[in-house]
Image: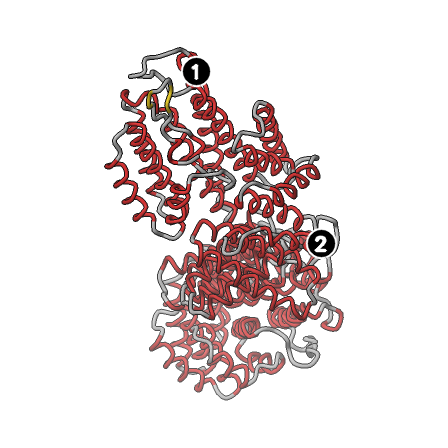
Amino acid sequence: MQFSQWLICRNGALTGCLAIAILGWPGLQARAEDPELFALRQMVKADLGDAALRYIDARQKLASEDDIRALWTQRRAETLAQIGLYSSRPDEYARANDVCEEFTSNPNNRRRIPWLKWQQARGYFLRAQSDLAAYLAAPADKSRAQDVLAAVRRIVEDLEDLDADIASRLPIAARPVSRDEPLEAPIKQLHSLQVDTSLLKCESLWLRVQVYPPDSKDRIAAATLLTDTAQEVLDRTDASWPNREQLLTIYAAGQLQLAAARDGLTTLLRLSREGASDQTRSECARLAISHLCASDQPSRARALLSRIPDRQATKLLAEVEIRLAELASVPVEARQQRLSEIVTLGRSVRERFGAYWGNRADALLVRRDLGTSASGASAPPNTALDLLEVEAKQLLAAGQTAEAMRVLREGIQAEIAAENSGNALSLASRLATLMAAEQDYTAAAQLLAETTIHFAQSEEAPEKHALAVAFALRGFQGEPTDSARAAAEKLMFAQLEMWPSAPASSPVVDWFKEIMFAQNRAEEFLAALWAKAINASAASDSEAANDIVYQDLVTWMDAFCSLPVAQRTSAVDAAAESADGGPSRETFKATLAIAQLLADWPGERRRAERYRTAAKQFKSPASVNTHLQPMADLTEAVRRIEGIRGGDLSGFRQTKLSGSSSQTVAMTHATTVAMVEAIALRPVKERIAWAKAVDLTHESELALKEVASSTAQSAACRIAGWLESPKTALEQLTDLRKRFPRDAALILHLSGVAAEIGGNQIDVSDKLASILIQNTKPNSSLHLKGRWQRLLNFQARGDSAGARQEAEYFLAVSPPDDPVWLARFESIAN
């Protein structure tokens, strides 16, 4: 409609009522529009929106008629909304709405209010259109989808209210009125506005259709409502309605979602050839191309590309879609290059046409999945993932790291929304690695951990989560704060709990041990690792799973042997509460038996039974699982200790280990110390013989001296005394006491060495033993060992009566709870 038609004479009078047909394209760009409005729209698309607004302001000031001022008011609202859509200035939507609100709230504008109400709904529509594009580009953001659906509901409700308002005005408009003051706009214009209201409603319903996933029930229902509504409008309009082709385009787009897809495609193909405007032909061609590409017909789609004018964003979008569909026929060696070209083309849309069109291009790149084509034919897998990776590489090569991270993050969100674990984990791993390269280890760990936990059942999850743990530890090393340590611990606990039988969890066990022992929280580590082994055994009885269990038990025993003797009992008690290890329960029981034997020498009441349990499971070294070899060698070491405690040196049968012992360093240290302590309880004249019988050597001495604990170093000094002379041990222990003056075990060793020297040193031994007795709890291991040393000293002096009297007194005052110790003291008392 031309400018001269904006002012309409009725009965010879100039009424100046608006004709809504001039308002132009509200969605699919098929509406015939006035050249001046078209020029304004092109200015907005060329990022000259502010200039367009200044032009509108000037025209409003020059307008002499209310109807002309109303027209430019409406154009101002339209232009503001267009700026919001194409220029990424969302505040302009609110400004457009304010323009409409101000106009419609003025009673003097009554006759023209319906058109501004329509324009207000149109502003809501344009914003919803922008939100839809943003949602399809990042479908993980479900709030965007809800915003679009809520906007469509509001638009439909407002348009229904407007339709009722128009209906109430029609009878008044049909009556003859004064030439000077018509009460309503001409009835023909109201009818035209009524039809255009239905058209905008259909356009809004088309937005709703696109929110839902293809072929979903919701999408089919929305498309059915759209086609029913459009059919009703088509039935009450004829070919003279200027916007009929636009409605036919929407109707056909809805048909593509239903069983009538072939009819819809036929309509679109016809309109793409015969449409009255470039906009109609262009939009119909684009919709047809999209449908043909989804149906694996890229050659037919490419034949339609010429129907879209050059230099339009829609042409670039169509080209992207066609190239994606053509990937199925691209040779493998050329695929990477083609992907790079597609990504470059998609990015050029945003660069040339702005955020709205850029989002529509991103939607094609992010959401298109060509793993299986519509016809069921084989197609290149993980195309969406490949596209994202190519785009990220291009951005990184251009130095746009932050933009590359954004692309990867949106890709992750899209894959999570689609429950595509493989792609999501792959992208999360790449983004986390990129974050780590930027020294943001905490964010890298958090991102990767959240993604892997979401897809915990995926085969890749354990390995990816272990990488998250590594990033967290790297962050803690760089910034050793309590919060960083806690974050790393949380991830390590999660790894052991969620994937106990996964090979990827094994290195995490070592990292966890290191960080927990560094904080003197060894017992927490032991409890977590024991639980992991129990869960791994219960999860599977496969050979691989059993190997993991055995490795965990060896690591547990190694850590257990690293504990000070005083802490071993509580660790054993905690493990004993959950010793049922499923298919590997006997192995757990045997492991626990050895730990119990090492927990309290020599106060264990059931040591013989427990040794048999261990020996039965860990038979000869040649017959056990390779991973359990350290346990077999440890069992042999325990046998030696039991032999020392039994005291039958002549009948002691020494079984040599096959080759070198496979015990861990901690196991070797623990059993060596235990042997030393057991020998120290034997009579002085037997000690050197026992040391040689169990192969205590200078290598054993040197190995213990490398251990930081006073217990190990004290044992090393005793070995030196047995291999060289007691004076050597005395000198070394005296020096050691300067470093650990209050160490009770060290005092006990000094007392024993003094007794070995004999002579006046036996009195020194007595004094040291008395200090130990006075400063330890009755019935404690060290207390009993101190009293035993006193008895041995009486015997060394040849004072058997004194030894018997001392033993009788002790048994009367504070008899030992442990039957082994009780028997020992009773043997001297009797």
Helix, strand or loop at disc 2? helix
Q: Which three-letter amino acid code belongs to the residue tagged 1?
A: Leu
Q: Which residue is at the far bottom? A: 724
Q: Earlier in the sequence, mark 1 or mark 2?
A: 1
Residue at 47% from the left image edge and 64% from the top image edge = 471
- From the viewer's perspective, tell me whether residue 621 is left or right of residue 571: right
Q: Which three-letter amino acid code belongs to the residue tagged 2?
A: Pro
Neighbours of disc 1 within 10 Å: few (<14), some (14-19), many (20+): some
Residue at 36% from the left image edge and 81% from the top image edge = 735
Q: Quadrant of residue 22?
A: top left
Instruction: Between label 1 and label 2, give the one nearer the viewer.
Output: 1
Quickly name the residue at label 1. Answer: 170
Is residue 46 depicted above or below 435 in this figure? Answer: above
Q: Quadrant of residue 611?
A: bottom right
Q: Nearer the viewer, residue 617 or 273?
A: 273
- From the viewer's perspective, tell me whether residue 291 is left or right of residue 117: right
What x and y, as percent, mark residue 712? 47, 74
Using the image, tell me which numbered label, if any, was put on residue 206. Answer: none
Neighbours of disc 2 within 10 Å: few (<14), some (14-19), many (20+): some
Q: Nearer the viewer, residue 436 or 416?
A: 416
Helix, strand or loop at disc 1? helix
Q: Nearer the viewer, residue 367 or 523?
A: 367
Quickly name the residue at label 2. Answer: 583
